[in-house]
Image (cartoon, rainbow, N blue to C red):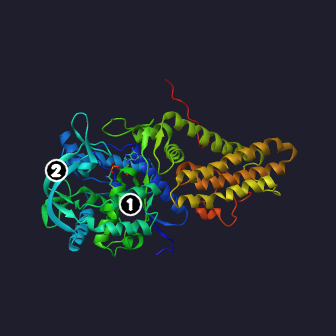
Amino acid sequence: MSAKQPFYITTAISYPNGHPHIGHAYEAIATDAIARFQRLDGYDVYFLTGTDEHGQKMQQTAAKLGLTARQLRDQNVPRFEAMVKMLNLSNDDFIHTTEERHYRASEEIWRRMEAKGDIYLDKYAGWYSVRDEAYYAEDETHLNEHGTRLATKTGTPVEWVEEESYFFKLSAYQDRLLKLYADVPDFVLPKERLNEVASFVKGGLKDLSLSRTTFDWGIPVPGNPKHIMYVWVDALTNYITGVGFPNENDPKFQRYWPASLHVIGKDIVRFHAVYWPAFLMSAGIAVPKRIFSHGFLFNRGEKMSKSVGNVVDPFTMAEAYGVDQMRFFFLREVPFGQDGSYSHEAIVNRINADLANDLGNLAQRSLSMVAKAFDGKLPVPGELTPEDQTILAAADAMLPAAREHMKTQQLHHMLHVVWSVVADANRYFASEAPWAKAKTDPARQGTILYITAEIIRQVAILAQPVMPVSAGKLLDLLAIPAGERNFAALEGGKRIAPGSALPAPQGVFPRYVEPEG
Ligand code: ME8
């Protein structure tokens, strides 16, 4: 097996009760950028995404449309798969919770929790939000002005549920969970989210209703198929199904579990940071190393949701701006872990300023000069000036700084580091003015162009996780061989090869121009 360190990363699995929206795309993009970063940095990455296809929400939406839950699933799941391709995700697998392998895993984790004595049969009487697929205590709900009871945190309607139900002894895990949070202080990032979870757990945990009997779209409880597993038991289990559970001898399970990172949205932290580790502890399985909770995206500041109807289609957005441009925009604009807003103006501004002007023009101008003045051969540098050394040192400092930020998934800081050097390189290029040296000092002109090409090489290598295609094109223009595009090519004083023949330069980052009409 490879000497590389394993890195298992997952997205949440999406409910396919509608079409994928920008929130789904955002999570997918961010997770992919982290997966690609780690891969380029020498990790053996396994990246899982998928769809969460069971539950009452699916069944209810289907009924409203006059479909069965399976028909709704069959209609919508291909859209999620298509989005994953369209966004150019580098996932190793796509899991469907309706797959046979997932039934086996969910049944096994159930049996183990039962064997541990953590599951008992009783009666549930309380509030349930179908839209959140979550149980709420009375004091987590309120009546609105129309007399409808809503979950206070999410504003979704709750209904009274009274039925026989299996329960999980969550209350027995309070101390172990608090110990986990204390022992692994970055178990949940950002930090504030861990604090919220810890104070929720400190407040006391009630046992969790673990099965339903009033609908059938889900995984039957082993030994009592009248009961369907609560959709979150099945959903969370996807993370171990994806690496071969229940076969713990599966080489994937051995290598990749426990997961390095579950990337999820802020609305589902409780499920991941409370229920999931408790289920795993009960079943005698190691808990994941980290949960990162990203923020929510707002369309011009307004919350988007299927029910409000202001969902922006990720396919439309990618069509309008380009996939890499969209990936870049979200990761550069929205501090990872916080909420963010997007608008046409903000996207165009990033495309034209950061990409077309700052990086695209610099590459185009410098490489055109190499084509014209040096016959397309990257010049051999002469003696370096302090200015050359300063900009090279700034470029060389990018990788360690980027790595440091990525240890805590600070994607926006990582991009900030890279684009600060892009800004420095533009200042360098403007003040060194290589075009003015064509006649007076062609050797110096060559050195400036060499240094600029080296900076662009480093920037492009580091931009690959976020913009794999465009950064790849930049590296093509610099004639960087495929084997020299990983982060090891930024270490040990490695530099772009002088004298290499470059292909004819082409624009990589077009300006966004408003369509006519
Ligand atoms: O929660 N902005 O599925 P889901 C950013 N099936 N992220 C958003 C968002 C928004 N506006 N809206 C949703 C589920 N998300 C469960 C997960 S995991 C074992 C089961 C995020 O389709 C959301 O936070 O409602 C979640 O991480 C993901 O999209 C899927 O949401």
Q: Foreground mark, 1 or 2?
A: 1
In the structure shown, which secondary structural element does the residue marked by tag 2 occupy?
A: strand
Q: Which residue is mark 1?
A: 198
Extreme residue in the right direction: 440
Q: Quadrant of residue 402?
A: bottom right
Q: Residue at x 54, y 66 (%)?
A: 42
Q: Position of residue 83 (x, y in %)?
A: 39, 47
Q: Position of residue 56 (x, y in %)?
A: 21, 49
Q: Which residue is mark 2?
A: 161
Q: Position of residue 9 (x, y in %)?
A: 43, 61
Q: How far apart, in angstroms, are the residues tagged by discs 1 and 2?
A: 28 Å
Indicate the amino acid at tag 1.
Ala
Structural crowding at the residue carrying mark 2, measured as other residues with C-alpha within 10 Å and reported as few (<14), some (14–19) or many (≥20) = some
Indicate the amino acid at tag 2.
Val
Q: Is residue 203 visible?
A: yes
Structural crowding at the residue carrying mark 1, measured as other residues with C-alpha within 10 Å and reported as few (<14), some (14–19) or many (≥20) = many
